[in-house]
Amino acid sequence: MSHRMKERLAYHLNEQRQRLDYLKKHYGQFKISEVTLEQIISGIRGVTLLITDTSYVDPHQGIRIRDFTIPELLRVLPKARNSAFPLAGGLYYLLMTGEVPDETEAWEVEETWKERMAVPEHVFRVIDAMPHQTHPMTLLSQAILALQTESIFARRYEEGISKPAFWGYYLEDSLNLTAKLPVLAAYIYNRKYRQGEHIPPHPDLDWSANFAYMIGRSDDPIFVELMRLYFVLHSDHEGGNVTAYSANVVSSSLADIYFTASAGINGLAGPLHGLANQECTRWLLRVLHHFGGLPSEEQLETYVREQVERGMTIPGYGHAVLRTVDPRFTALADLAETYFPQDTLYRLVKRVYAVVPRVLASLGKVKNPWPNVDAISGALLYHFGVRQLDFYTVLFGISRMLGVTAQTVWSRGLYKPLERPKSITSQMLEAMIAQADETAPAPLASTPVA
Ligand SMILES: CC(C)(COP(=O)(O)OP(=O)(O)OC[C@H]1O[C@@H](n2cnc3c(N)ncnc32)[C@H](O)[C@@H]1OP(=O)(O)O)[C@@H](O)C(=O)NCCC(=O)NCCS
């Protein structure tokens, strides 16, 4: 167990519980948001109804993880050996405790993970039992769910434990699960794309480098660097994104971390969310194929305009919260610019970036015409020969589980209750409007359908 991390976490949870109790007691009636009907009909967009301390998406600055912007985060976290990028263990420490770890504390998490990497045989058998064409996200979700047999929280709960003890077992489960994620991802990759040539984890490597090693690609140090950067960038995006939100609701029922993480992964598998990296790379390759190479800006603009006029979505562009270029896009572009600025797909990414925002902005309805992380991440993986597009979201997923598990440990540590918003029927809504506004037309619901 990473003792220091648990100790600091206990301290901060205790402090935070007191703060929240105080706020609830003295400011319980303080209004944070008002909800309009339009917002309810439009995906609850812009309604603040969650408190999540691991990170915050600033619409104009992008993600702040424990208040650090991406450039700050890359600067302050302890780096892996011979690397410009952070150790995932240090990031996890920060997500969990809110404190920047020193190198020893970051390595302590890495060592804890190493002790917990062994995956029970039945989990591999679950993956092996699925048809070969199964989507890797399905396999990841199933593998995580198959690990549920190992939940310490579930066992202790059955024996009878009280609320203050919950978070400690959620933490144990979280460390056990996150330790195994690179192993599961590599197993899925090797089974699907490397004829089952599995490589066990290397005891000397950090969490991120180990993934590269297990898929047989640790010989390229820049790919290893990309993995370290990638796993930091995708780890957390506050509480309301589909992954975190679904996971939080599931965990609020005291479902253990395995049920919780699997639910989050299922949400990430949608093309409007995590799967956009797969979709975007597919789209970029289609563009190259269509033009027989890199199109000019003019050609690209005509092509994009035709697509949006036909009602198509340009993957990798737009965001529910961001109103600027995603700093995760910029961080990945910096890496590509440093190491392979002439790569064709990367050059296309840049050209798309020069064209798509002005096309989307000209439609007058897209709230954020700028690229998000998915507009580039796949192109970088592709450069390094990871060309199985349907695998891309798995990498997003194992990184995002760092944030999701940290959020979950905090939710249980703060004794958050079951989440259960209220719903009404549309007829009830119409009746409410009619009561408030005498001039309102007769409820639509009572109008017979022709
Ligand atoms: C991310 C996304 C789902 C956000 O949705 P949202 O909050 O509803 O976005 P907006 O409020 O800006 O949408 C307003 C309109 O612009 C359209 N729009 C938004 N992004 C668009 C895009 N990339 N291409 C074309 N049209 C887009 C929407 O479809 C909507 O059109 P409608 O009113 O005709 O239905 C959306 O931008 C999208 O689908 N992007 C592409 C997928 C993607 O990259 N997802 C990963 C996000 S990290």
Image (tube, grey):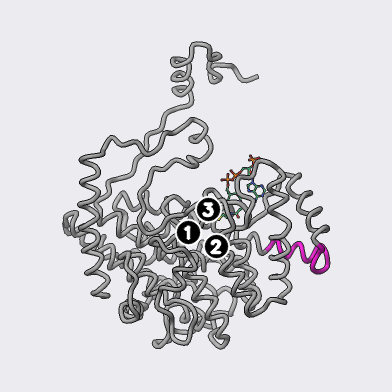
Q: CA distance from mark 1 to mark 3?
A: 9 Å
Q: Which residues are magenta?
A: 282-296
Q: Which residue is mark 3?
A: 60
Q: Mark 2 and mark 1 in contact (Cβ < 8 Å)?
A: yes
Q: What is the spatial separation of the Cα atoms under label 1 and label 2, in whole angstroms?
A: 8 Å
- Is residue 149 visible to us here? no
Which is more N-terminal, label 3 or label 2?
A: 3
The residue nearer to you, when weighing 121 against 106, is 106
Q: Which residue is mark 2?
A: 327
Residue 345 in the magenta stretch? The answer is no
The amino acid marked with disc number 1 is Ile
Image quadrant in which the N terminus is located: bottom left
User: Magenta includes 288?
Assistant: yes
Residue 420 position by quadrant: top left
Instruction: State the SS at label 1.
Output: strand
- Residue 343 is situated, as x and y percent measured from the top left of the image, at 71, 75
Residue drawn 30% across the image and 54% down it: 411
| Vertical position of residue 28 compared to residue 298: above or below | above
